[in-house]
Amino acid sequence: MPRLADTVTLAGGFAAGAAVALASAGALEAALRLLFVSYALDVLDGWVARHTSGSTPQGQMLDRALDRVSQVVAPLVVYASWLSTQDAAGAMDALFALYAGGLVAAGFWRLVYRPVPSLDYFSGLPMFVHAVVLLSSVLSEEPVHPVILLALLAASTAPVPYTRRLRGRGGPSPAPWPRLAVMLLLAAAPYDNGLIAELASLVRAAMLVYALVGWLPPALGITPGPRRAAG
């Protein structure tokens, strides 16, 4: 029988898989909502693991494997389904297909050959950045140029450390509840609200800035220091 934390992880994977099916059928809004539910469960499973039987190697691998569905496959399908309703065609479609194939391959390559990230640094641009950029582009109704996407893909495959946190020495790790609340709010929010589009555009810009400069703290030797677990 799976542990409670693994059950939560599997529920998140189920939601992400269902989102893929809905997006493929053109039900974009339902797919987006299910995907944010999946992200909420991804936040929750870590908290459950820490407060029940703890994390296991099998649980970590299960979580990382299903992250490839929720952070790579599902956002790609949602974005591609939305993009098919836009005017982009020809070379743009070909470049996006190149990016999509590369991202799926890179996601599973990182799963096998890249270690679990440390508390301070990611090895290469983390995969969730792609999910945020793709989904925020859908919510803001602003396509992102595939050349930018290919640059993000290159950053994810490069052996370059990206900072994970900038907390001071001894600072507590963040509680999961704010992130959980944000994911649930996004799952329930009215997407036709102009505020959602504006916020999505700002979030996308922030992710692109992180992709551009997130490698600087490790390159400059800036070390966040140890952190305490949140109470």
Image (cartoon, grey):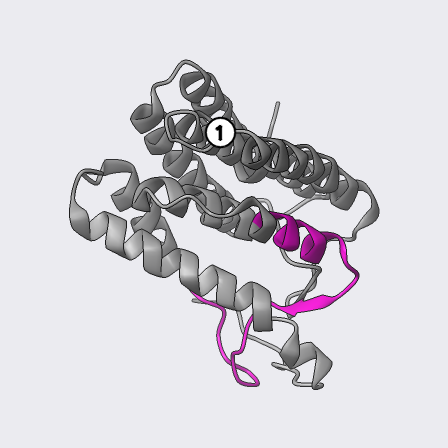
Q: Which span is picked out in magenta?
A: 149-175
- Asked whether 194 or 69 is in front, the reply is 194
Q: In which quarter of the image is residue 6?
A: top right
Q: How many marks?
A: 1
On screen, residue 65 versus residue 77, left or right, reads: right
What element does badge 1 sit on? Answer: helix
Where residue 78 appears, x then y in whole percent?
45, 30
Identified at 72% across, 80% down, the residue is 219
Identified at 36% across, 49% down, the residue is 180
Where residue 109 appears, x then y in whole percent?
78, 41
Identified at 38% across, 47% down, the residue is 136
- Asked whether 150 or 53 is in front, the reply is 150
Q: How crowded is mark 1: few (under 14 residues within 10 Å), some or many (20 or more)?
A: many
In the rendered image, the vertical position of residue 161 relative to residue 158, given as above or below: below
Question: What residue type is disc 1 on?
Answer: Ala
- Asked whether 113 or 137 is in front, the reply is 137
Identified at 51% across, 79% down, the residue is 167
Q: Report if residue 181 is visible in the image.
A: yes
Q: Quadrant of the C terminus?
A: bottom left
Instruction: Name the residue tied to disc 1.
Output: 80
Residue found farthest to the front? 90
On screen, residue 22 versus residue 159, left or right, reads: left
Q: In which quarter of the image is the N terminus?
A: top right
Whether the magenta-drawn stretch holds residue 148 is answered as: no
- Asked whether 44 or 14 is in front, the reply is 14
In the rendered image, the vertical position of residue 1 relative to residue 41, given as above or below: above
On screen, residue 141 versus residue 225, left or right, reads: left
Q: Report if residue 176 is visible in the image.
A: no
Where residue 202 appears, x then y in whole percent?
34, 61
